[in-house]
Image (cartoon, helix red, strand yellow):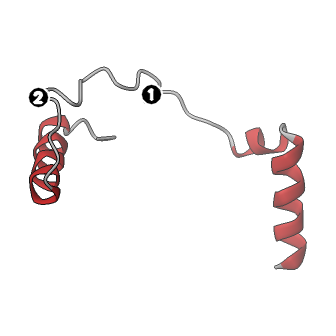
C-alpha cells in the first residue's frame, strides 16, 4: 500500500476474507488513505517525547 498498489492489496484482503469466511466492503481501501506519505520524519523526533527518550536510552545502554 505504501507504493500505491491499492488494487493488489484489496484483492489480497478479499481473498483472505473469503478463506476466513468474513465479508468485507466492496471498496475497503481508497487511494487517499494516507495523505502524509510524502512527508519524512527525523530520527531526532523520538527524542522529543520523554517516554521514547527514556526507552531509547535504556536500550542503548543495555546493548
Q: Secondary structure at mark 2?
A: loop
Q: Residue furthest bottom?
A: 63
Spot occupied by residue 44 in the image (x, y as percentages of width and height): 77, 42
Find residue 62 and report its image quarter: bottom right
Spot occupied by residue 25 in the image (x, y as percentages of width and height): 16, 30
Asked if marks 2 and 1 touch (Cβ < 8 Å), the reply is no
Mark 2 — residue? 26
- Residue at the image position 34 percent from the left and 25 percent from the top: 33
Who comes first in sequence, dot 2 or dot 1? 2
- Residue at the image position 14 percent from the left and 40 percent from the top: 23
Q: 10 Å neighbourhood of mark 2: few (<14), some, or many (≥20)?
A: few
Tell us which disc is closer to us: 2 or 1. 2
Which disc is residue 49 wearing?
Answer: none
Find residue 8 and report its image quarter: top left
Q: Secondary structure at mark 1?
A: loop
Left or right of 23: which side holds 4?
A: right
Quadrant location of the N terminus in the rendered image: top left
- Residue at the image position 83 percent from the left and 44 percent from the top: 47
Left or right of 57: which side holds 29?
A: left
| Observer-nearest of 11 and 32 | 11
Q: 10 Å neighbourhood of mark 1: few (<14), some, or many (≥20)?
A: few
Left or right of 58: which side holds 45?
A: left
The Cα–Cα distance between marks 2 and 1, rounded to whole angstroms, is 27 Å
Mark 1 — residue? 38
Spot occupied by residue 16 in the image (x, y as percentages of width and height): 16, 55
Left or right of 54: which side holds 36?
A: left
- Residue at the image position 86 percent from the left and 50 percent from the top: 53
Quadrant location of the C terminus in the rendered image: bottom right
Query: In the displayed structure, would residue 4 be above or below residue 8?
Result: above
Spot occupied by residue 20 in the image (x, y as percentages of width and height): 17, 58
Query: In the displayed structure, would residue 2 be above or below residue 12?
Result: above
Amino acid at each position: 500500500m505504501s507504493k500505491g498498489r491499492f488494487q493488489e492489496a484489496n484483492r489480497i484482503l478479499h481473498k483472505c476474507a473469503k478463506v476466513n469466511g468474513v465479508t468485507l466492503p466492496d471498496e475497503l481501501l481508497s487511494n487517499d488513505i494516507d495523505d502524509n506519505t510524502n512527508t519524512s520524519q527525523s530520527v531526532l523526533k523520538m527524542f522529543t517525547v520523554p517516554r521514547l527518550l527514556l526507552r531509547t536510552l535504556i536500550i542503548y545502554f543495555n546493548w
